[in-house]
Image: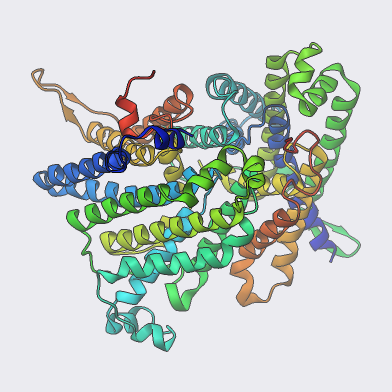
């Protein structure tokens, strides 16, 4: 039982962090950035490249890589499209994602490489008589800490205030002196940091890295973000946790012959949620279509 | 809007009809020319062109819904997969089915349609499925519609990939007759273009395009948006299903992996690169992407530069990178696609 809860929370936490990374960018520029997957993948490759070195160095390098890549994609691909409609931007982000993916395959090959960025954590601990992996506990803890830091940043700093203003009404915030480019770059930097941390935790759990590492994770997080309400940060967290819990529960409770269809059930639930609440469970302000 | 204006000033109904059908004629002639040209090429080129023509069928199916309704749709590949499996299972000789899929339900194991009926049957099954599940999804717009149709594709993928008794699950389904050559693929592509054109000239499509421009105003004018969208969705699914049936009988084997993320993005990207809002865009986008990837493949395998004695060779895998990069460049410089949403005849008409 405790095992299921821990599984659900750690998986949900990963989805929530990824959904947050997507949500932050979406909230300020209405871009559903699918290339977030490649931020995760590239950060994981940075971890792999420095796997002989001290963990702190590898982590710092992966955060740096993800941040630079995030800002670079914004500058090269998304800035020229800022005035395009969301569908075109979504497709552009798919193309960016495909481009980086193919570049990775070209540069490092598509073979799976193993890594263990956090060997200290790969042992089980006992909680209330149940065996759970320390890594999952740490994952949950990191998610909580990150959320707290993010909330503090958004509520207590000037940059955070500007971001929230831009998320609520971008044009209006520009009129009162928020610099559009600064806020958007900041959002991409934050999403890069989140992606790097997700990469660390995810790679530590799976123990391997390959050019498509981030894709399934980001797909699910995408769904989580939409269920929660794209552009709403509490929504991203709620959606991430809900999807994580849903996936874990389905895995644990479905009869064995239906288990291969687990994800199908999950996506049916997604469609149902969207039908009832097209803007997500916790819709972002300023997202409603005005007439 | 321009349609209505032309209605008022047209000198005669006949000339009006000819003018409106001109883009269709140009597109059909273009595809026909492609088939004739490829017929003179070697077998490798022919296979590339056949695949491109099948892609035209699918992308046109995608256009029928996405172009006219303006709603994102990632489920086309799912309906393509349904069409492919339906066409394969309904036309395969019962003896073969006994070997590969011994657990098929009796009526399906006994069914054996003529091969040419396969794509139509596949399209029909896909259309019925679209009609069954599409209704509620048609109420969604924007990103929500994108995610819902994406979920739909995913569900189809999971079900086909695990429904072992009918599809063979993760193993490939082999032994399909590869009857789809240059001419069948070309004729079906031309048929798909004609179907899309006829549809977009109907009052339903015009009303649907009105809802694309302004949903609230369209609703206020008495347009039943959900119903019209569903119609386009079903017709689009039919076309994609036909494309799937062709695809299976071109490749000779079916794997669910062929109907997953990569083609999903690729087909939508083809349409967007060409221009979502016109049929010309669907055709030009597909042909452009196919031509680009073919050119890059040539370079990868070594392209002798005439006159210099040098051979231009790129390392394997670079072509994919360049293709993705080029599509991105097109999107950045032409967010509305190559055609900008205009039909082919309007592209050559001077702006006034």
User: Image quadrant for the C terminus of chain B?
Assistant: top left
Q: Nearer the viewer, residue B284 or A254?
A: B284
- Name the quadrant containing residue A65: top right
> Looking at the picture, how far across and down is residue B245, in whole percent?
34, 63
Query: Quarter of the image holding residue B19?
Result: top left
Residue B189 or residue B84, whichever sits in front:
B189
Q: Is residue A27 above or below residue B199?
A: above
Q: Is residue B56 above or below residue A98?
A: below
Residue B43 in view in this figure:
yes
Identify the residue at horizontal 79%, vertical 11% (top origin). Answer: A177
Q: Nearer the viewer, residue B47 or A55?
A: B47
The residue most toward the top is A177
Q: Nearer the viewer, residue A279 or A94?
A: A279
Location of residue A215 in the rendering, given as x and y in whole percent from the top left corner: 57, 45
Q: Residue at x 66, y 57 (%)?
A: A271
Q: Viewed as shown, does residue B49 lie left or right of B70?
A: left
Tell me residue B286's x, y (percent): 34, 41
Q: How is the image coloured?
A: rainbow
In the displayed structure, B318 sits above or below B85; it is above
The answer to whether residue A112 is seen in the rendering is no
Residue B93: percent from left, percent from top: 27, 80
Tally the numbered discs: 0
Image height check: is B169 above or below B328? below
């Amino acid at each position: 039982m405790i095992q299921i809860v821990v599984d659900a929370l750690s998986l949900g936490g990963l989805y929530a962090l990824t959904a947050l990374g997507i949500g932050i960018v979406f909230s300020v520029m209405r871009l559903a950035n699918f290339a977030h997957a490649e931020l995760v993948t590239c950060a994981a490759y940075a971890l792999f490249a420095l796997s002989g070195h001290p963990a702190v160095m590898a982590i710092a390098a992966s955060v740096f890589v993800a941040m630079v890549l995030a800002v670079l994609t914004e500058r090269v691909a998304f800035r020229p499209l800022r005035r395009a409609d969301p569908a075109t931007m979504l497709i552009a982000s798919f193309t960016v994602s495909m481009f980086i993916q193919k570049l990775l395959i070209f540069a490092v090959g598509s073979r799976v490489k193993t890594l263990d960025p956090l060997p200290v954590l790969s042992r089980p601990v006992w909680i209330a008589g149940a065996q759970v992996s320390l890594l999952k506990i740490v994952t949950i803890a990191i998610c909580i800490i990150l959320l707290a830091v993010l909330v503090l940043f958004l509520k207590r700093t000037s940059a955070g205030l500007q971001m929230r203003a831009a998320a609520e009404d971008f044009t209006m915030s520009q009129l009162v002196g928020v610099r559009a480019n600064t806020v958007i770059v900041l959002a991409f930097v934050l999403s890069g940091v989140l992606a790097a941390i997700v990469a660390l935790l995810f790679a530590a759990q799976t123990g391997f890295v390959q050019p498509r590492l981030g894709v399934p994770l980001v797909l699910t997080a995408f769904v989580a973000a939409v269920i929660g309400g794209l552009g709403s940060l509490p929504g991203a967290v709620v959606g991430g946790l809900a999807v994580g819990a849903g996936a874990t529960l389905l895995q644990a409770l479905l009869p064995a012959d239906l288990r291969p269809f687990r994800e199908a059930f999950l996506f049916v639930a997604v469609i149902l949620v969207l039908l009832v609440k097209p803007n997500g469970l916790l819709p972002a302000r300023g997202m409603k279509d005005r007439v | 809007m321009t349609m209505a204006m032309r209605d008022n000033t047209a000198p005669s109904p006949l000339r009006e009809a000819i003018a409106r059908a001109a883009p269709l004629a140009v597109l059909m002639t273009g595809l026909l020319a492609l088939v004739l040209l490829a017929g003179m090429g070697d077998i490798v080129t022919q296979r590339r062109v056949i695949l491109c023509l099948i892609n035209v069928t699918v992308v046109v199916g995608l256009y029928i819904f996405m172009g006219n309704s303006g709603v994102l749709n990632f489920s086309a590949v799912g309906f393509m997969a349904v069409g492919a499996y339906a066409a394969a299972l309904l036309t395969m000789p019962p003896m073969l089915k006994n070997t590969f899929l011994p657990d098929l339900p009796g009526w399906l194991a006994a069914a054996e349609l003529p091969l040419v009926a396969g794509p139509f049957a596949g399209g029909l099954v896909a259309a019925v499925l679209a009609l069954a599940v599409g209704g509620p999804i048609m109420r969604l717009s924007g990103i929500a519609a994108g995610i819902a149709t994406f979920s739909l594709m995913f569900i189809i993928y999971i079900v086909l990939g695990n429904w072992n008794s009918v599809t063979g699950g993760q193993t490939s389904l082999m032994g399909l007759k590869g009857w789809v050559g240059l001419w069948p693929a070309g004729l079906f592509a031309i048929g798909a273009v004609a179907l899309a054109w006829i549809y977009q000239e109907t009052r339903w499509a015009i009303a649907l395009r009105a809802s694309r421009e302004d949903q609230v105003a369209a609703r206020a004018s008495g347009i039943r948006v959900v119903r019209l969208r569903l119609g386009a969705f079903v017709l689009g699914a039919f076309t994609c299903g036909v494309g799937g049936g062709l695809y299976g009988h071109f490749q000779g084997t079916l794997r669910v992996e062929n109907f997953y993320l990569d083609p999903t993005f690729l087909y939508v990207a083809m349409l967007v690169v060409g221009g979502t809002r016109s049929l010309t865009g669907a055709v030009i986008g597909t042909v452009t992407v196919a031509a680009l990837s073919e050119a890059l493949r040539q370079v990868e395998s070594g392209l002798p530069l005439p006159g210099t004695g040098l051979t231009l060779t790129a390392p394997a895998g670079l072509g994919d990178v360049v293709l993705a990069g080029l599509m991105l460049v097109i999107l950045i410089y032409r967010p509305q696609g190559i055609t900008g949403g205009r039909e082919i005849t309007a592209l050559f008409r001077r702006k006034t």
